[in-house]
Amino acid sequence: MMVDRMKPGERLVAVLMGQKPDRVPVSPFILGYAAKVVGLPIGDLYTDPKKSFRAQLLCAEMHGYDSSPMYGYAAVGAWEFGGKVGFPYEPGQSAPYVIKEPVESEEDVDRLEVPDPKTAGSVPIAMEIARQCYAMGLPAVFQSGEVLTYAGNIMGPTRLLTWMIRKPELVHKVCKKVEEFLIACAEYFTSTFGAERCIAFAGGPIESNKLISPKQFEEFVYPYMLRIHRKILDMGVPIILEHPCADQNKNMPWYRKLREECGWRGKYVWNFGPETPLETQIAQFGEHDVIMGNVDPPSFQFRSFEEVIMLCKENIERGIKNPSGYILGPGCEMPPLAPPINVYAMIKASREYGSYA
Amino acid sequence: MKDEILRGLTDSVVSGDVEKCVEYAKKALEAGIDAYEAIMEGCARGMSIVSEKYEKGEMYVPEILCSAEAMYAAMDVLRPHLKAESIGTPRKVVLGVVRGDIHDIGKNLVKLMMEAAGFQVIDLGRDVPNEKFVEAVLREKADICGMSALMTTSMIFMPEIIRELKKKAPETITMVGGGPLSQELAKAYGADGYAKDAAVAIRVAKELLSRRGGI
């Protein structure tokens, strides 16, 4: 097994700069798992920025992986726009969840106001974590989408999906407000830290083709996503971490078009779900962007150490072929209940099979 | 005339047209078509087409939800006219999202497809404690217990529920589904069946019941 010649931060920066690191970097998409590792309830990771930052930092240090602390969750949007979320303090829970949606009727759509990011819902928590990252020379990460996932949390997924057919104009109104909010968030973070020190992170499950068609993605996601990305790139944010959650194979042409219409500016890190083959991603983005490989997340929880090593090996062997860089990771958040040895399996697999020497 | 009305019901379920569906349901009653036949040969057939289209990637959840609205609107018209002897004894399914999990779109789609296929569904909702599944299965003498989970932290309750059911209601078929589940994991949990989505769930349920000699 190779001996590391780079430090975690250096390894990730090298890949993002288009250089070859000593070995494949590892970004295990860890949130709730970090709380378990340090003995905190998962809820604290989403409510207490100091504890959250410390847990994530210690977890990264303990395992020796390359990514740094961040904040975000899939139920985002409801709290920010005036609804209510619950936090995962009960058995079985792993992330914040919506308790009350701010839009429950057609009239609520017009009443919905674009909130001030400085005080909106979880943004102050994300900002506090970003401040602590910034103070340590780490990137300040802010959430920049996806718009339809925000809209689904604002009006409830069933109402959203039904209105996409019955009352599309109301869905567009909400999406437009989300777009305004996300651009305001980006301005808030970039003006606080400087755009060059920021990373935008976008992802969400409602865009998945398990729920919507590529045609609906074209109408209800793409125009908003394009405008937001253009603005963020105009601000000078150098890196966008894009996580098309779950099966989004049919949306691939739109993600490709997004990059083309943004002139391939900035460096994108793509983290598709395990349903999307690495070869497909390399074919679409390999000339410019980094691919963050997508090992099946539940496998980290229920498979043996040896099996996880083999899954990581296979992912590395396919992903390392990407000409613009590759990072080993799961295809979505690391299961909070994954045995620690299976997170270590990623580091070990990178050392054994991911050397660039 | 009868065929035309039943086809009208089917087509308006598929297209999610609530008004037309209600209109055809009323026409069916006016034409003296048995309400149960109108539901099964009109509405349920429409839902079956929707299910096939979903499986083939020709329809997505927004369209299915509209089809569901149309189907339930027609059923509201037809249900009061059902004759007990036409219905027979429907198979019972206890359905719920396991503890700690509030993601219920998948479960609701399964419920919809099951009801359209003639099952009686006892919907326990979401974030359902283990013992509620077991209690409901025993109380209802359910043929099937379906459990759904979207989180890796909540799916761990499934094997506990399945173990309890195997002890207390061994005849009941257990089925699991949801994002982090797989055939392999379902087997490891001791479930009788696994379905990757709502369309498959109906097929698996019917197969398992048929194997048990119940359908």
Image (spheres, helix red, strand yellow):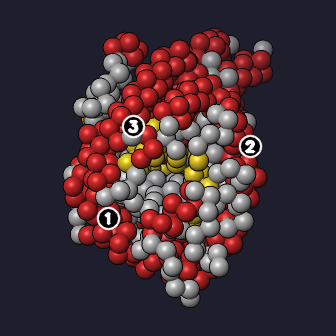
Badge 2: chain ID? B
Q: Is residue B174 something one can see in this rendering?
A: no
Q: For the N terminus of chain B, give its image quadrant.
A: top right
Is residue A248 depicted above or below A105 in this figure? below
Is residue A308 depicted above or below A167 in this figure? below
Q: Nearer the viewer, mark 3 or mark 2?
A: 3
Badge 1: chain ID? A
Residue A247 on image: x %, y %: 62, 49
Q: How much space separates mark 2 and mark 1, taking CA atoms?
A: 45 Å
Residue A26 on image: x %, y %: 51, 68
In the rendered view, does B191 fall on the left or right side of B103?
A: right
**Residues indicated by labels 3 and 2 sit on the same polypeptide chain:** no
What residue did someone put label 2 on?
Answer: B56
Viewer-proximal residue among A16 and A309? A16
Q: For numbered disc 1, what is the local secondary structure?
A: helix
Badge 3: chain ID? A
Q: Nearer the viewer, mark 2 or mark 1?
A: 1
At 77% from the left edge and 17% from the top edge, which residue is drawn?
A: B4
What residue did someone put label 3 on?
Answer: A190
**Residues indicated by labels 3 and 1 sit on the same polypeptide chain:** yes
Q: Residues within 10 Å of mark 2 (few under 14, many from 20)?
A: few
**Residues indicated by labels 2 and 1 sit on the same polypeptide chain:** no
Q: Which mark is residue A57?
A: 1
Give the amino acid at mark 3: Thr
In the rendered view, does A32 fall on the left or right side of B86?
A: left
At 34% from the left edge and 69% from the top edge, which residue is drawn?
A: A59
